[in-house]
Amino acid sequence: MLGPRDIAPDFTAQAVVGQEFQEVTLSDYTKAGKWVVLFFYPFDFTFVCPTEIISFSERAAEWEEMGVQVLGMSTDSHHVHLAWTRTPRADGGLGQEVTFPLVADINKDISKSYGVLTMDPTVGYFGAPLRAVYVIDPNGIIRSVTINDEQVGRSIDEVVRTVQAFKHSEANPGHGCPSNWKPGAATIEANPAGSKAFFKEWGKQKEL
């Protein structure tokens, strides 16, 4: 399974973009200077998955503002992806166009290359990817990985916050983002002398 600082395996695959079938390539986005949030999910027409995809889609303005390209992926075909977008939410569908490409990993090669394909034949989603999120920088390097088992959906707020924190640290070399950091909050100068200003204020808060 891939982790931070690994090179994100490039891929080209069919996807549903709006209501059209298009071929998408990961490196097209990174070479254009975008950060990429690549997330895997087990199956279309299931239960937790539509809540995640709609939540990712509803944050379209924030992704655009941050210069982030979101890519969703399962091993379903692009035909199934399209049918899912056209199925009402009340019937387990997405009920709308999704604001990012839904990629079809039909031969499962992409899921295998990222190490997220479920290989345990005793579980009901054998041969499907786990709920993995990869934050990939414009150099094609993985900066963050989070993986959930099938039963629990992801926090989109935390994905947004993670990208914001990495972008901030990239723009401010030598500074780290502390636990629960959000834009506008103080960062830590990553050296013994410089960090004292942060810890002085942080210590006061912890003593209250």
Image (tube, grey):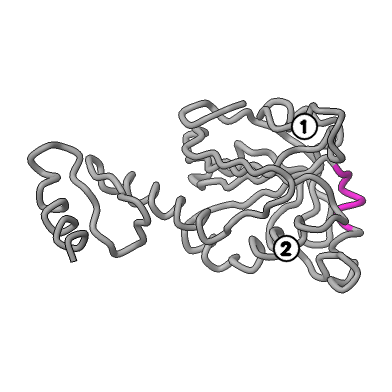
Is residue 82 shown left or right of residue 68? right
Q: Is residue 41 magenta?
A: no
Quarter of the picture holding the C terminus: bottom left
Which residue sits at x=58%, y=47%? 37
Looking at the image, residue 92 lies above or below residue 177: below
Quarter of the picture holding the N terminus: top right
Q: Residue furthest left?
A: 193
Q: Which mark is residue 51?
A: 2
Looking at the image, residue 18 lies above or below residue 177: below
Name the secondary structure under disc 1.
Answer: loop
Looking at the image, residue 94 lies above or below residue 103: below
- Mark 1 neighbour density, 10 Å: few (under 14) some (14–19) many (20 or more): some
Q: Which mark is residue 53?
A: none
Looking at the image, residue 182 lies above or below residue 179: below
- Mark 2 neighbour density, 10 Å: few (under 14) some (14–19) many (20 or more): some
Disc 1 to disc 2, C-alpha distance: 21 Å
Is residue 29 shown left or right of residue 54? left
Position in image of residue 35 (x %, y %): 51, 46
Which residue sits at x=45%, y=57%? 161
User: Which one is nearer the viewer's eye here, 73 or 100?
Assistant: 73
Q: Earlier in the sequence, mark 1 or mark 2?
A: 2
Callout 1 amino acid = Thr
Position in image of residue 140 (x %, y %): 52, 34
Q: In this figure, which residue is indicated by the disc labeled 1?
A: 118
Span shown in magenta: 76-82
Dominant SS of magenta comes to helix
Which residue sits at x=86%, y=36%? 106
